[in-house]
Amino acid sequence: MCGIFGCIGEFENSGKAAGICLDGLKALEYRGYDSSGVAMINNGNIAITKSPGKIELLKNIVKLDKLSASVCIGHTRWATHGGATAVNAHPHTDSSNSLAIVHNGIIENYIEIKQKLQTDGVNFHSETDSEVIAQLVSFYYKGDVQKALTKALSELKGSFAIALLHKEHPETIFAASKESPLVIGFKEDFSKIFLSSDPNTLRPYDVSVCFLKDCQIAKINKRQVQIFDFDGVKQPLESLKLKDDLSEISKGTFEHYMLKEIFEQPMSIQRAISSFFGQQSEENKLKNFKKLDRVLILGCGTSYHAGLVAKSLFESIAKIPTDVEIASEFRYSDPIISDNTLVIAISQSGETADTLAAVREAKSKKAKILGLCNVDFSTLSREADETLFLNAGPEIGVCSTKAFTSQLSILLLLAFYLAKQNHQSQIAINRIYQQLHSLPNVVEQVLNQAKEIETLAQKYANFEHFFFLGRRYMYPTSLEAALKLKEISYVFASAYPSGEMKHGPIALVDEKLITIVMGGNLQTLDKLSSNIEEIKARKGRVIAFLPESTRGKISNFDDAIFLPELVDELSCIPYSVAGQLFAYYIAKERKTDIDQPRNLAKSVTVE
Ligand code: F1P
């Protein structure tokens, strides 16, 4: 699970191809930052520089001023097979150092292939699955790289995007893709050609792009791009022009991207709301989804939590039965999908492999797919029948914040739309609708409480176990708050529907366990208050996030933050913002790598 970047062409300065590759890798770092590396051909030999850790470390050791190569491929890695070491870093070579490959994906039958090659006397150097590709291509090579690559690929099981350099063909990059994105960008006269896992990284170069389709090979020479299928049959070069994107990708005055993105939420929620109306009315993206008897939502991580909130919204507002499935589980569940089921796939990045695999499974059963996504040209947006874009702007922090609240805003509007289609009374809708437009304002008020939340986080930052409790809409809100804490603070955090506490987890309560109750669901507040008593009776410590109106009425907690009050259907938004701030300040106190937490990647491109 990784990012691939490559370039070939007439670049102005010496070292330029490598420099461009390093910039490309930096932009792809969200796909993994365990190690990185670049390969070029120097004086007729493969020259590789690689380093464990982030791109900055690679930049320090690549001697750009000494490099004149006009062809370069590079890789940023999220480790799957083998630790985050220099040996396991890509690019990988064959034993005779005649070629270099970079790979994104997983080769499921790599052990089998490795053993076969070892029997034939091939020596392996790394623990990765990717090295078998390099060794296998080399094993089949008899002067024609494309032939050898095709033969090797036909033996691989799993998903892959690959770029390859061969020292006997120094002016060519070979690339191949199966269930893993790879896009070629080129100037009109083909004077500069690029290869990347993500089209958005090619925006600075003002190029047209061609997405490599499933099971295609590209042969990229100076001034020429040729596409073939795995049988060697030439395919058309279908290209499109990327739109300009002027989105600002800087931290501004904030210490971390995550904090900046938390504070952007009044604006991003407002944008999500207006863009929903725009996308619905101008393009009528929902016209194909009218006769529905069921909704099925797919997603992972934070996007799955947004799906859980949507289930309650769709069922209570639109009265449409709704199921939510963790995408990685859905694929193997032999799902039943009727003709009138709408499948909604939620993914900030639109590249999450589990979600894409689930979408493909649903499509194979003839389901219509509505994508909910933040990234233009992402795989999800290209594979879904329609996509509603969040328009939240780039989310750089690995931990999802503004994308989540934008997802919730759009899902709420979708619930209203479905309610109308399903002829539901407008009275219930109006009650919620009236408060919808106050959301940005309410979130602003929560942000104004950041200092208070920071002080609270400082007090509890040294505890190792946190338990989040909530009922109804506050249960997924609790799951999300616990996930934020796990992702960036590395403390153990779990979430439960508060009624379930007494059915087992209450055994964990002691003075070292911090229970955080999310009290934004007015309908169930009395019950939640009793659950707090049960924890206090067992010497547990309780932090409560409660509606302002309960100040002085509920007091059986150790600490509390009072938040603005909204109808139950909307309160998950301000409470999630409070949860994000709490996790952020705990992580800051614990001095973790907040924007790029250990072991994680923003875009999880393997199953
Ligand atoms: C799903 C997700 C994120 C999480 C992390 C890893 O991403 O689980 O929710 O914060 O970044 O991936 P996506 O499908 O919404 O892009």
Image (cartoon, grey):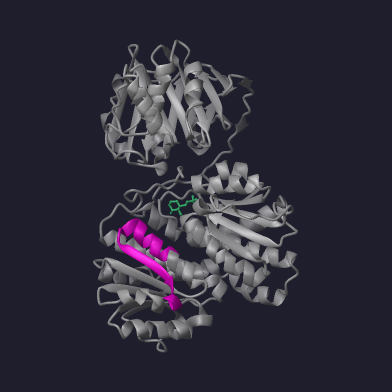
Image height check: is 446 above or below 261? below
146 or 257, which lies in front? 146
Image height check: is 580 above or below 152? below
Can residue 582 be seen here? no
Question: Where does residue 270 sit, x and y in percent of width and height?
Answer: 56, 61
14 or 376, which lies in front? 376
In the rendered image, the residue lying farthest to the bottom is: 553
Among the 4 quarters of the image, the one containing residue 557: bottom left
Quadrant, the N terminus: top left
Q: Main secondary structure of the magenta part?
A: helix
Q: Residue at x 56, y 41 (%)?
A: 379
Residues in magenta, as a range: 480-500
Q: Residue at x 38, y 14 (%)?
A: 167
146 or 379, which lies in front? 146
Question: Where does residue 204 sit, x and y in percent of width and height?
Answer: 49, 34
Magenta run includes residue 488: yes
Magenta run includes residue 134: no
Q: Residue at x 37, y 68 (%)?
A: 450
Question: Where does residue 229 sit, x and y in percent of width and height?
Answer: 59, 24
Compared across the picture, whether 587 is left or right of 113 comes to left
Can residue 547 be seen here? yes
Among the 4 quarters of the image, the one containing residue 88: top left
- Looking at the rendered structure, the number of numbered marks drawn on it comes to 0
Question: Where does residue 562 sit, x and y in percent of width and height?
Answer: 41, 78
283 or 171, which lies in front? 171
Compared across the picture, whether 313 is left or right of 576 comes to right
